[in-house]
Amino acid sequence: MKPFTYFRAQNADEAMVQIRKPDSKFLGGGTNLIDLMKMGVEQPSHLVDITRLPLTQITEYQGGVRIGAAVRNSDAANHALIRTRYPLLTQAMLSGATAQLRNMATMGGNLLQRTRCYYFYDPTLGECNKRNPGTGCAAKTGVNRLHAILGTSEDCIATNPSDMNVALAALDAVIQVSGPRGDRAIPILEFHRLPGKTPQVDTNLNVGELITAIDLPAMPFATRCTYLKTRDRSSYAFAIVSVAAAIDVDSGNTIRNARVALGGVAHKPWRVPAAESFLTGKKAGEPAYREAAGLLLQGAKGYGHNDFKVELARRSIVRALTDAAAVRV
């Protein structure tokens, strides 16, 4: 591991000053960053510990809920406001990692998780444009069973590994950030990026910006939901395909509103508003769900080992919407 300096910030002003030092990184739970430092993938010269900043509250906010960026994943998942109003988020977070990791990981850090692509994570395995821009993408012709089928580019086929991010995408979350140019709000669908020609850039955060909170807007039908995660084993495994679904069905079985986001299939949580609009006004049931799945997966393609993901995603979408519609609230 490359030597580095360390500073524990006591307030946001201190953090903003320290992050201006060359090659600096914010440190929250460290469950991803420290691993990458050990592997030599991330090599910051300076770490700014932000765990003492007053960003650990979960409160009601403008009809919804605001979650501080330093709230631990386990605390958010088990908080009464989240469990009762946004159970989709609780389900997603409890399906990720282990209890020990959830006790350490922060909400802001989870948003910034870097891909778990084998070739990115281990410099000994081959070239990786995300780790070393311009060198190529070994995953395209290598072992790519867990890789993306949507939104890929010639330079990268990696996926976003977070379960939490998929639920946040379905819940229309808004990310609050502070930086050298002041405060701003970033809708979750604009926060993460597709790889394009710059796969090394995962988000639309600007240099020196700090995530301060995650806002969940009021969504009355968010309690009729499910988080479906297909994985190789029942714990501590990343999603092969995941679906976060929430649906509003009236007494006549007509869909009034729906949200569907996919994980494990793209460089960012995958959501297609046109698929949700299509569902509105349709009778709840498999025919409508299958057509919506077709819209969500338009343009999907595999790279050999992950060809099966296209059909798996289709079936997972239908199953998740079916299960969500069956929830009694």
Image (spheres, helix red, strand yellow):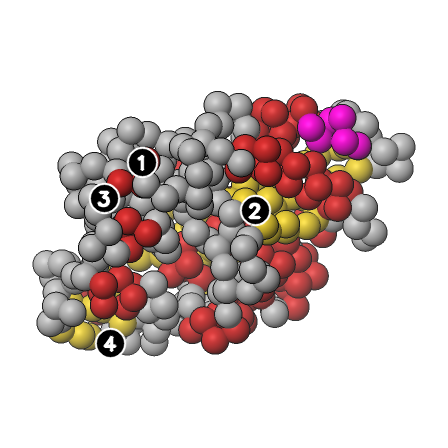
- Observer able to see residue 234: yes
Q: Earlier in the sequence, mark 2 or mark 3?
A: 3
Image coords of residue 34 (percent x, y): 28, 68
Are there few (<14), some (14-19), or many (20+) residues within 10 Å of tag 2?
many
Judging by the rendered image, the residue that carries numbered circle 4 is: 8
Between the residue at mark 2 and the residue at mark 3, the CA separation in whole angstroms equals 25 Å
Q: Residue furthest right?
A: 252
Q: Residue at x 36, y 68 (%)?
A: 31
Q: Earlier in the sequence, mark 2 or mark 1?
A: 1
Are there few (<14), some (14-19), or many (20+) residues within 10 Å of tag 4?
some
Image coords of residue 316 (percent x, y): 64, 41
| Mark 4: amino acid | Arg
Are there few (<14), some (14-19), or many (20+) residues within 10 Å of tag 3?
many
| Mark 2: amino acid | Ser
Judging by the rendered image, the residue that carries numbered circle 3 is: 128
Pick the residue in front: 84 or 193.
193
Residue 242 bears which disc, if any? 2
Image coords of residue 54 (percent x, y): 39, 71
Q: Earlier in the sequence, mark 3 or mark 4?
A: 4
User: Which residues lie in the magenta part?
Assistant: 285-290
> Quadrant of the rendered structure where residue 51 is?
bottom left
Judging by the rendered image, the residue that carries numbered circle 1 is: 141
Q: Residue at x 65, y 68 (%)?
A: 80
- Residue 201 lies left or right of residue 74; in this view the side is left
